[in-house]
Image (spheres, rainbow, N blue to C red):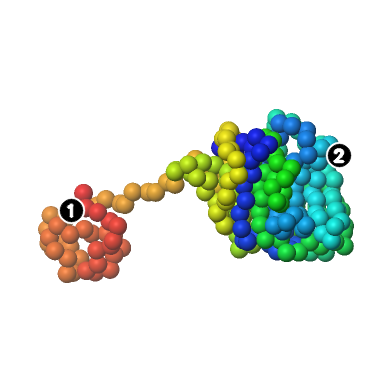
Amino acid sequence: MAISFNGSTHLRSGASTPTTTPATICGWARPISGDYAYLASIGSADGSAILGLVFHGGLGAIVASSLANGSWSSSIGQPWLLNQWQHCAAVFKADGTWLLYQDGLLTGTKTTVNQPSGLDQLVVGARPPGILPMLGDLAEVAVWSTELDDADVAVLAKGVTPIALAHRRRSLAAYHPLVAGATGGIPSLGDPVTTTGTPGFAEHPPVIRSIGIPHATPAIVPPAPVFPRLAAAACLPTGAANGGVFAPGAAAGVVLPGVKAA
C-alpha cells in the first residue's frame, strides 16, 4: 500500500528530524508527472533552510538538493521513470558531500560549503512550507540522522524496509510507511504526521520487514513436546505426583514448563 499525492496534498511532522547534516532521506516513488516536485524534505518552517529529494522538472532528473544562506546546492542524478516505482535516496554528509542514489546505484555527487541548519520538520510530498507538491505515489519514506553507506542503500533498494536496518535503528529519526492504519490514520515512527489535503491510496510492491524474511511469512512456533502420562508412581521423578509429566533429562522432582501431558 502507498499514498497517492494529487498535487495539493502533503504530510508534515515535527522536530524528530535531524537539525543539520549528516542526514539521509529515502523512499519509494511512482511519479505521474514531469513537473518539479519533492519526494520528501527536511527544513525550517519558513523554508529558508532545506535538505530534499527532488524530481527536478527543469533538469529532468532526480536531485539531492539543499538550501542554505540563500544558496542552492544540488547533486544531479538520472531522469526519473514516469508511472514506475523507483527507490530514491539522498545522503547529506557532514563534510558537505551530497550523494544521490537511484534504485541502489550512486548516480550523482556534489560538494558544497553551504550547510543548512535549524531544520525542524519533515515534509513528505512537498518542501517547507508546503510548496512544490508531489503528483504520484509514495511509500516507505524514512529519515536518518546519519550517513547511510552504499551497502545500506543497496539493501533498501531491494525492498527491505528501513526499520529492518538494525545497525541504523538508533539514528532512524522518522519512518512513514504511508499506509492506511486500522482507524484510517497513517501510522509512523517519529512525530505523528499532519495531513494537508486528502490523500488517496495505491498499490505498492511488498516490502521485506526483516532481512531475509518477507513480511507475509508467519513465524513458525514449534508445539510443546507431548509425553505420555506415567501409570505408576514408582516411575515418576522424586517429589512428582501421580499423573505428573516426565520430561527426559529433567532433574529429579522437576516438571519442565511448557511441556504438557498427553
Residue for point 64% across, 37% down: 5
Q: Position of residue 218 (x, y in %)?
A: 45, 43
Q: Is residue 256 visible?
A: yes
Residue in front for this viewpoint, 4 or 144 = 4
Residue 154, position as x, y percentages in the image: 71, 47
Looking at the image, do the residues carrying marks 2 and 1 touch, with CB atoms under 8 Å apart? Answer: no
Using a 10 Å C-alpha cutoff, classify the residue at mark 1 as few (fewer than 14 neighbours), some (14 to 19) or many (20 or more): some
Which residue is pictured at 72% across the width and 49% down the height?
127
Graded by Cα atoms within 10 Å as few (under 14), some (14 to 19) or many (20 or more), the crowding at tag 2 reads few
Q: Quadrant of residue 131?
A: top right
> Is tag 2's residue or tag 1's residue first in the polypeptide sequence?
2
Q: Quadrant of residue 135?
A: top right
Q: Secondary structure at mark 1?
A: loop
Q: 237 left or right of 165?
A: left
- Residue 165 at x, y percent in the picture: 62, 55
Residue at which label 1 appears: 229
Give me the C-alpha separation between circle 2 and circle 1. 77 Å
Residue visible at 66% across and 57% down in the picture: 121
Amino acid type shown at disc 1: Arg
153 or 109, nearer to the observer? 109
Q: Amino acid at mark 2?
A: Leu
Residue 94's tag is none
Residue at (79% x, 49% y) in the render: 64
Q: Is residue 51 above or below residue 182?
A: below
Q: Is 23 placed left or right of 11 in the picture?
A: right
Q: Is residue 145 visible?
A: no
The residue where tag 2 is placed is 59
The N terminus is located in which quarter? top right
State the residue in front, 233 or 261: 261
